[in-house]
Amino acid sequence: MGNADLRSLASIRDVAFADIEGSVVAVDAHNWLYRYLTTTVKWTRDNVYTTAEGTEVANLVGIVQGLPKFFEHDLVPVFVFDGEVTEFKSREIADRREKREAAEERLAEAEERGDAVEAARLEARTQRLTDIIQETTRGLLDRLDVPVIEAPAEGEAQCAHMNAVGDVDYAGSEDYDTLLFGAPATLRQLTSKGDPELMELEATLEELGLMREGLVDVAMLCGTDFNEGIAGIGPKTAVSEIEEHGDLWGVLEARGESIPDAVAIRSLFLDPPVREDYAIDTTLDPDLEAARRYVTEEWEVDPAEVERGFERIEESIAQTGLDRWT
């Protein structure tokens, strides 16, 4: 679910890494990368990840810092990238762009008055996944032999599909949309310290007394990345309304409300465009030296900022099961 307020409806529990070792995780690449990108920018000097020509590649620092969490726990990440932007999500993207531009204005003001802390916070909020970041992310993952899949549309939907058909053990995302797209099991907090959270679809539906269609209806009433919600309806009210009126259409009729493109948006969640022609090789053979050269020489990232991450990857290769590595 795009709306974090709906966390109160999802069945989420802590899970120990020891209980999921050896698993394959389809990672919502844009979601994962953006979180590392913003935290890297917030706490790292920009000269560390900026080339002589002024190109920012903070993503490379974030990837090297973030991947060890998978490898150290014998997890194989499969990075799934968004494809074409759906018609309905263009509104959400426009809203994000407007917020980013506002943050850029405040950033300039903070820099002018010498407020370094506020500037760092605002700079993180102005980050976006540029073409160079997209290119270099794939370039580094390729050298580390991490599987990459290009989704036709929403990355979360592709992750959910791969989880639902059993090709991966978990979807990995901080977004709640994986539930709506039908992922049976989603790992959250993969960019945070400590153990992850497990969000389960069947347990969520059982606790709410809903079918998946009803869960999608609840989300649409509250608001998603693809539509604005109905004023005055929060998560608990939405569940009650669906119970009383049967489905989204019954609630809208009873309230005299409407949601533009509701049929298409509902269908997008329940039957999203996904790719079937993919292959996942879980036997990894990372070329660490090539990866180091790519990051520190070709893209001029300060070696001191990434060396520990590369060391952790190398150590994990030696320590985890040998059947996972060639």
Image (cartoon, rainbow, N blue to C red):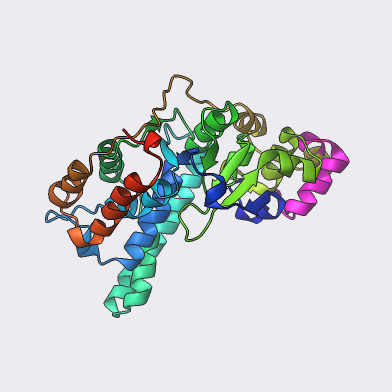
Residue furthest right in the image: 244
Which residue is drawn at the image coordinates 15% and 46% (left, top)? 293
The image quadrant of residue 49 is bottom left
Main SS, magenta residues: helix
The image quadrant of residue 254 is top right
Is residue 234 shown in magenta? Answer: yes
**Residue in the foreground of this view, choosing between 186 and 169:** 169
The magenta-colored residue range is 228-250
**Residue in the foreground of this view, choosing between 200 and 121:** 200
**Residue in the foreground of this view, choosing between 136 and 66:** 66
Q: Is residue 311 left or right of residue 281?
A: left
Q: Is residue 254 left or right of residue 186?
A: right
Instruction: Give above or below for 151 relative to 55.
Output: above
The percent position of residue 9, horizontal first and vertical second, equals 71, 51
The percent position of residue 173, horizontal first and vertical second, equals 51, 46
Instruction: Give above or below for 187 relative to 85.
Output: below
Q: Is residue 192 left or right of residue 181?
A: left
The percent position of residue 270, horizontal first and vertical second, equals 64, 30
The percent position of residue 34, horizontal first and vertical second, equals 40, 51
Quadrant housing the N terminus: top right
Q: Can residue 255 be seen in this snapshot?
A: no
Q: Can residue 326 be seen in this snapshot?
A: yes
Instruction: Give above or below for 290 relative to 7.
Output: above
Is residue 267 shown in magenta? Answer: no
The image quadrant of residue 50 is bottom left
